[in-house]
Image (spheres, rainbow, N blue to C red):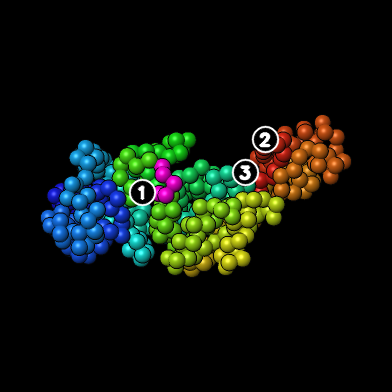
Amino acid sequence: MPDAELEAWLRLGLIPRLGPVAFRKLLSSFGSPEAVLDASTTALTNAVGASLAAAIAAGPDADLLAASLDWADEDNNRLMTLADNDYPGALLEISDPPPLLYLKGQTALLHHEAIAIVGSRNATPQGVANAEAFARELSSDGFAIVSGLALGIDAAAHRGGLQETGSSVAVVATGLDTVYPARNRSLAHELAQQGLLVSEFALGTRPVAGNFPRRNRLISGLSLGVLVVEAAIESGSLITARYAVEQGREVFAIPGSVHSPVSRGCHALIKQGAKLVEVAADIIEEFGRTAGKLGAAATQSPQSKHPELLRVIGFDPVDLDTICARSGLTAENASAMLLELELEGTVVRIAGGRFQQVRQP
């Protein structure tokens, strides 16, 4: 795209309060961003109202425009518009595709078949293990893993995706000059090099609550289906699942403990018709792939030094007193065995002095 044309898209995209719907309405009315910027105030008012017409006439912040053009000139960065031939076809299928995408990393990933993996920020150790393992298996089968760079399930999904050939795409709710949350800074840098960071928000955009649902529609929009690993009833992951349904995407959910608050959202989705999955093969087969060894390998439990104690613990969080009561062990012996299980990675210690078995998917 010629520089002047790209600058026109960016000028219009940086107009305050001009959202995707109004942007596309202007394109429909005038044909191109250049024509919009050359239009009279009267014509703009007739199209989008007096307030937006005045904002377009005033133009964008000059410093932000210059900074954005400089950013786009840097290696590994790109501004993509609805007019680009390689604009992702998956987003053209949704009702409100963003007119402008800010991209950092491997832009070819926008055209890979993709599965979104989302879930709770306050994930359990089992949920984190599930998200990373499912992402790794799906990525090894060629799917790009799409998520939102949040703590918990999202971060685990990105880590799993980056380990295999499908890689991972992070759709964020800030400008790409900001990493949110800051604790995921190193992960974001890894995604910028080996995966892809995507945003529809201008540089300098800070994390604002209203931006996250907008981000979620792109997570589902870029994907063939959405896997919810753990989610509370009021979770934003359920918003992503709702968008997936509206966009004609598949929804998958992993069941969990009936006692866990972060399993209730998944159980609600399953009741509403989401596909219950236990292994990555369940998702792969849904899209006509041959799962091969995945189904068998994914159901094997790790060999442990103390299988009898694992049976006593089960898969719900449990405290030491309960473990001793169930097993008949003294607190000293049980603690020693639990330490060995922690070291081998089959048990983790969580809040409240409790222990939880982590089954490796």
Please name the amino acid that badge 2 sits on: Leu
Q: Quadrant of residue 345?
A: top right
Q: Magenta span covers which residues?
A: 207-211
Please name the amino acid that badge 1 sits on: Val
Say which residue label 1 marks.
198
> Horizontal and vertical percent for residue 359?
66, 48
Neighbour class for label 3 at 10 Å: few (<14), some, many (≥20)?
some
Q: Is residue 53 in sight in this rendering?
A: yes
Is 218 on the left or on the right of 1, as rendered?
right
Is 180 on the left or on the right of 336, as rendered?
left
First in sequence, mark 3 or 2: give its number: 3
Residue plotted at (38% across, 40% down): 206
Magenta-drawn stretch contains 130: no
Q: Nearer the viewer, residue 243 or 347?
A: 243
Neighbour class for label 2 at 10 Å: few (<14), some, many (≥20)?
few
Please name the amino acid that badge 3 sits on: Pro
> Horizontal and vertical percent for residue 264?
63, 56
Say which residue label 3 marks.
125
Q: Is residue 63 above or below residue 117?
A: above
> Horizontal and vertical percent for residue 205?
34, 42
Q: Is residue 250 above or below residue 209?
A: below
Q: Is residue 132 in sight in this rendering?
A: no
Give the alpha-carbon distance from disc 3 to disc 1, as whole Å: 28 Å
Of the two numbered discs 1 and 2 in the rendering, the one whose residue sits closer to the viewer: 1
Give the alpha-carbon distance from disc 3 to disc 2, as whole Å: 14 Å
The kind of secondary structure element at disc 1 is strand
Say which residue label 2 marks.
343
Residue plotted at (61% across, 66% down): 271
Q: Nearer the viewer, residue 208 or 355?
A: 208
Q: Nearer the viewer, residue 162 or 25?
A: 25
The kind of secondary structure element at disc 3 is helix
First in sequence, mark 3 or 1: give its number: 3
